[in-house]
Image (cartoon, rainbow, N blue to C red):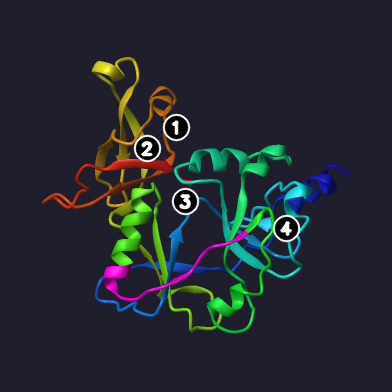
Amino acid sequence: MKIILLVFLVTSLFAKKPELFLLNIYNEDINVTSWYMSEKLDGVRAYWDGENLISRSGKVFATPKFFIKDFPKHELDGELWSKREDFSNIVSILNKKKPHTKWSKLTFNIFEVPHAKGGLIQRLKTVKSSKYIRIIKQIKVKNKKHLDEFLKSIENLGGEGVVVRDASLFYYTGRDNNALKVKSYLDEECEVVGYNKGNGKYEGMVGSLSCRMKNMQVIKIGSGLNNKQRVTPPKIGAIITFKYYVLTSKGNPRFPIFLRIKN
């Protein structure tokens, strides 16, 4: 009986890992004129299979009934999001194992309708907005200057960046150069391997994190940590995301800035 119950619990928490379209990194050699651009929301990717909201890894979110009562029976792909610069709060809401009322602070922001017919804009028109379903606005790119101005406006508001897509294509999954993320900075992941004491106003707290990158180099990351994170820093072994703009002569990120703990 215990074995049967355990199997039920496991299968009730996880579903088949969804096949998704993924983003490559934009470079200026790619002409994206007449493509469509939208804000890249700093939330958590979610896939609606007609019955459940599922994470990229196949975890079934503990979604309250009030949140999904107006969701359609067909599939949707989007971002669970609240507002800009609120990623840690979004993750804390989604990590609860039981449905709860704080889901009311979130919306499901749609950027794709899997298996729908036509190009991107036609596919998005099949979705009806509701209290908790939003369609991410798509803007046709006039030229590179138009893209640069839009990116700057999003980053000035505290947004993460921009997504550009060739909207003429039928629905597909996987990663290629027809869907790109555009940012004024680069981001990367590393593993927390130690802490460094803070000085001055950070005395008694963590001044910076020692982190091991994929190339095994260890760097220090202090910028971007708030006081709460300096008192209770990411655990040793945690994977974090940081951003930077240029590399040093040794190939390491110059002035890395903490963004978030990887979800």
Q: Are marks 2 and 1 in contact (CB under 8 Å)?
A: yes
Which sits earlier in the primary sequence, circle 2 or circle 1?
2
The answer to whether residue 194 is left or right of residue 81 is left
Nearer-N-terminus badge (3/2): 3
Q: Position of residue 252 (x, y in %)?
A: 20, 49
Q: Amino acid at mark 3?
A: Asp
Q: Is residue 65 left or right of residue 32?
A: right
**Numbered range of the magenta stretch:** 134-146
User: Which amino acid lies under the numbered mark 4 shown in the image of this protein?
Assistant: Asn
Q: Neighbour class for label 1 at 10 Å: few (<14), some, many (≥20)? A: some
Please say if the residues under marks 4 and 1 sit with CB atoms less than 8 Å apart.
Answer: no
How packed mark 2 is, by other alpha carbons closer than 10 Å (few <14, some 14-19, many 20 or more), is many
Earlier sequence position, callout 4 versus callout 1: 4
Q: In the rendered view, tell whether residue 118 sits above or below residue 63.
A: below
Instruction: Find disc 3 in the rendering and name its residue.
Output: 42
Q: Amino acid at mark 1?
A: Lys
Residue at the spot of label 2: 192
Tag 2's secondary structure? strand
Residue drawn at the location 47% of the way across and 67% of the way down? 22
Comparing 237 with 33, the one in front is: 33
Residue annotated with mark 4 = 52
Question: Disc 3 on helix, strand or loop?
Answer: loop
The residue indicated by pointer 1 is 235
**Do the residues bearing badges 2 and 4 touch, measured as CB atoms within 8 Å?**
no
